[in-house]
Image: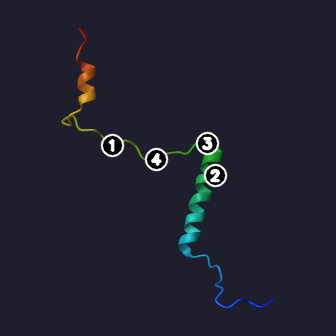
Amino acid sequence: MKKKKGQKRMRITEADYMLAQRRAARLEEIAEHGKPISFRKALHKSKKVYDRKKLKKQVPED
């Protein structure tokens, strides 16, 4: 068969390779632990921040 004019070859770029590696690592992690593992922890919340929900919990109901 002849190649069609203007047909481009599929090329795997470095970015595609890195993306595939990340996906594979994530799938392995999920298979091993049963769920995704998150390494990001919650940041410390300042005591000076106004929090209406927290204040409502502190007020005793009459």
**Viewer-nearest residue: 26 or 11:** 11
Which residue is depicted at the point 28% across and 21% down? Answer: 57
Q: Are marks 4 and 1 in contact (CB under 8 Å)?
A: no
Left/right of residue 37 with respect to residue 1 in the rendered view = left
Of the image marks 3 and 2, the number of the one nearer the N terminus: 2
| Residue position marked by numbered label 3 in the rendering | 33
Give the Cα separation between the discs numbered 3 and 2.
Answer: 9 Å
Of the image marks 3 and 4, the number of the one nearer the N terminus: 3
Of the image marks 1 and 2, the number of the one nearer the N terminus: 2
| Residue position marked by numbered label 4 in the rendering | 39
Q: Residues within 10 Å of mark 1 (few under 14, many from 20)?
A: few
| Residue position marked by numbered label 1 in the rendering | 43
Q: Amino acid at mark 1?
A: Leu
Position of 7 relative to 15 (above/below) = below
Q: Amino acid at mark 2?
A: Glu
Give the Cα separation between the discs numbered 1 and 3.
Answer: 25 Å
Give the Cα separation between the discs numbered 2 and 4.
Answer: 16 Å
Q: Amino acid at mark 4?
A: Phe
